[in-house]
Amino acid sequence: MSESFDVNGWKTPPLPEGKGGRVEWFRVEPGTTKVIRLLDAMPVTHPLHHFGRTPIVCWGNGCEPCQQGNPAQRYQFVRVLERTDERVKVFRMSVKVGGILGEQVLAEHGNPTRYDIAVTRIGVGTKTTRYTFTKVGVETPVDLNGQRVPEWNEIFPPPKKNESKESE
């Protein structure tokens, strides 16, 4: 499903697709650990609506999904360099998981853009999944090998004015 929603005369697109799209998403499979470098010192929080597996950015102000009784949930986003393939990706996490990251790593070790972090996922589904975050190695500069870090407006595409609506 990749439909847009009408929000007061504006089309709200879903989050960009990962494979071949503008943004690659960081994922950790259950029972595995991946190493990342955060490229942002602080996450960005943004509300999303869910329609099946398709997340739609909530822009508030009476958006159509809100009016349909589909409340938005807040998520945190941080741009990362995944060490497995050395590619820039975006890590979407619940506010709860973002708090765990803050408690387990940021509070103790400071600015997370200076060191790598091991992310371990245990469990499947929203009720049983748990994450742990551990600082890995020593502080070193990050090398993106010429990769471009996506801008936030690419990750959260702003709504576009409906061309079928008449201007008022």
Image (tube, rainbow, N blue to C red):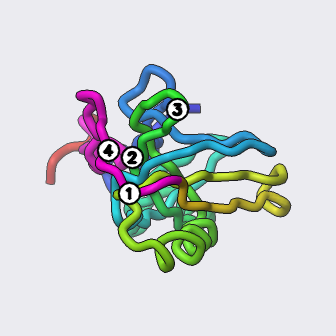
From this viewpoint, which residue is outermost toward the top? 20
The vertical placement of 113 against 34, above or below, is below
Sequence-first disc among 2 and 4: 2
- Name the residue tied to disc 1: 139
Pair 4/3: label in front: 4
- Name the residue tied to disc 4: 142
The residue at 39%/49% (across/down) is: 79
Q: Position of residue 97 (x, y in %)?
A: 62, 66
Q: Main secondary structure of the magenta part?
A: loop
Report, in whole angstroms, how far the alpha carbon at label 2 lies from the one at label 1. 40 Å
Look at the numbered disc 4 and give the secondary structure of its residue: loop
Span highlighted in magenta in the image:
137-163
Look at the numbered disc 3 and give the secondary structure of its residue: loop
Q: Is residue 7 left or right of residue 32?
A: left
The amino acid type, in three-letter code, at marker 4 is Val
- Name the residue tied to disc 2: 12
Pair 2/4: label in front: 4
The residue at 23%/28% (across/down) is: 146
